[in-house]
């Protein structure tokens, strides 16, 4: 029966959050929507796209969309453990929004900074990229 198949699978609202995403049970392909109207409204409010001030959507990108020299620089940061794991599509989008020379310059600046006291290297890099974009009026 369906109940025996779902035994031990927590309801959606009780799932653990891991990096902002619910853990998905095997075979789970998306958010469950309850038939209760107030749940559906909460779902719609939570999942509608919001635009940042100024009406611009944030750029997202994958590694393959970046210039090859920028890809190599990021791979080097990963290989030398100067960043902890792959950068998310939002940070890659910030890199993509910068002209290639400025992107390389920002990544080089990050590479040369002492990271021993940094609590979150990725957040530091994101801040560095955001400041470069602000100088260009792109954020």
Image (spheres, rainbow, N blue to C red):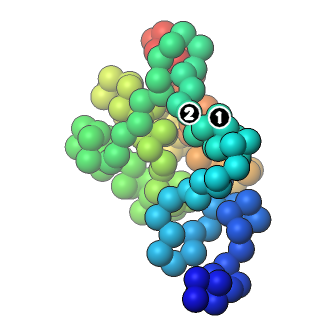
Residue 80: tell me if it is visible.
no
**Tag 1 and tag 2, C-beta contact below 8 Å:** yes
The residue at the point 53 percent across, 31 percent down is: 49
Disc on res. 122: none
User: In x, y percent, where is residue 24?
Assistant: 57, 69
How many numbered callouts?
Answer: 2
Residue at horizontal 56 percent and vertical 33 percent from the top: 48
Badge 1, how many Cα within 10 Å: few under 14, some, many 20+? few
Q: Residue at x 38, y 26 (%)?
A: 97
| Residue pictured at 65% horizontal, 84% vertical | 3
Callout 2: 10 Å neighbours few (<14), some, many (20+)? few
Q: Position of residue 91 (x, y in %)?
A: 49, 39
Label 2, secondary structure: give it. Answer: loop
Foreground of the two, 78 or 87? 87
Q: Which residue is mark 2?
A: 48
The residue identified by callout 1 is: 45
Residue 79 image offset from top left, x and y in percent: 42, 63
């Amino acid at each position: 029966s369906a109940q025996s198949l779902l035994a031990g699978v927590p309801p959606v609202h009780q799932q653990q959050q891991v990096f902002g995403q619910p853990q998905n049970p095997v075979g789970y392909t998306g958010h469950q929507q309850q038939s209760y109207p107030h749940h559906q409204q909460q779902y719609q409010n939570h999942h509608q796209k919001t635009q940042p001030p100024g009406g611009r959507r944030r750029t997202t990108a994958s590694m393959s969309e970046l210039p090859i020299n920028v890809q190599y620089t990021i791979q080097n940061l990963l290989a030398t453990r100067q960043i902890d794991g792959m950068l998310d599509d939002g940070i890659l989008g910030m890199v993509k929004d910068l002209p290639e020379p400025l992107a390389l310059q920002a990544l080089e600046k990050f590479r040369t900074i002492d990271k021993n006291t940094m609590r979150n290297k990725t957040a530091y890099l994101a801040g560095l990229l955001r400041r470069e974009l602000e100088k260009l009026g792109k954020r």
